[in-house]
Amino acid sequence: MSQSRLLADQANRIVGLESQPVLRNLLITQCYHDLSSELARVLGVGNANWCTYATWASRQAGCTIRGEDLIERLHPDTPRIWRTLLRAGVLNPVTPPGWIVKHVHTPFDAVEHASRSVAKGNLKVFEEIGEVFARNLEDSSFEPGPPPLREAFAHYRQAEDETNPNTRACLMLFGNLKCGWHEQTRLQPEIAEAIKAPLQTTNALTRRFLPILRRPLERLTQLIQELNNEIVTQGFMTLKLPMTRLQLGKDIDRTIPSYFDAVEHDPFLLQFSAAGHGGDGAENWSDLSQRMRYISRLFRCFHEDNDMFLAPLTSEQCKRLYDGRLPRGTL
């Protein structure tokens, strides 16, 4: 069986894992890596494609889905304890611990709300874009439905036939950006939902306990806001790549390759350049145009970095993952 067919079958299986968001995210992350490598091989283009970036975005999303981007800040030993709780199903609502976390309101509801929202977005994007990549690799005549994806794959096919390396790079960029545009448009509800996590938590706690615990709840509300700030900052405003950690609210300290000068004034890029206060960083990650402004810069800065193709998981971690077990070590 061809590698493309194996990836298509794998993508179908992953989409079906509705009750295991932690394992599903790790499988999505690894599948994006495999799709990225296979697409590079098929196109004969060694530069980053959309799946290359999606690998690391999904890996970062996994930190929020597992609650680790906040938990690891509470105490040096907490991540190890938290990983044990994850194995017990603390964020899986179909297990007894997960049912308790879902139905008993505590300040950590903000973690659970953010985890659920990000997991939903992670699956949505993979189902709508990742699975399309898998199906297109298996059958190049397959035409994805939404216009941005049709345009993206048209750019990729043009890049495959292009002999000029600079033109090929620009075609790959626009293929990546059209996928990114569709991705970010579809993620808008989940991002907004995750950012509202502390408000939902505060409202639920207030309705239940306000008559008898007014003063403690004032401190509790403050704590929830602090928890959410950590979640949003680490989950949405940080992106860890193989060679660096980016703060998405700050400019990217890298030079854009000169061959992208040819498309600097393209209307598709210009529509995002004026969003926010300018520069690269997004002041408000819930703003779609500001996210796209940052992403368009990100895609250009790391377009030719070979480290982007590094595997997100080790072979031993993959073995445990494919056995249905949470891998050990750094995820």
Image (cartoon, rainbow, N blue to C red):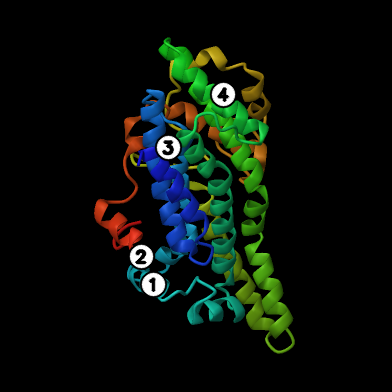
Q: Earlier in the sequence, mark 3 or mark 1?
A: 3
Q: Residue furthest left?
A: 316
Q: Earlier in the sequence, mark 4 or mark 1?
A: 1
Characterize the local packing of mark 1: few (<14), some (14-19) or many (20 or more) Cα atoms within 10 angstroms: some
Q: Which residue is mark 2?
A: 326
Q: Which quadrant is home to the N terminus?
A: top left
Q: Which residue is mark 1?
A: 87
Q: Earlier in the sequence, mark 2 or mark 4?
A: 4
**Which disc, if any, is residue 154?**
4
* Side (left or right) of 23 relative to 130: left
Q: Nearest to the eye among marks 2 and 4: give it.
A: 4
- Dividing the picture into quadrants, the one containing residue 224 is bottom right
- Would residue 248 be visible to someone looking at this image? no
Label 2: element kind: loop
- Would residue 143 be visible to someone looking at this image? yes
23 to 167, vertically: above or below: below
Could you say which is closer to the camera, residue 229 or residue 293? 293
Label 4: element kind: helix
Q: Amino acid at mark 1?
A: Arg
Label 3: element kind: helix
Q: Amino acid at mark 2?
A: Leu
Tell me the CA gap for discs 2 and 3.
23 Å
**Which disc, if any, is residue 52?**
3
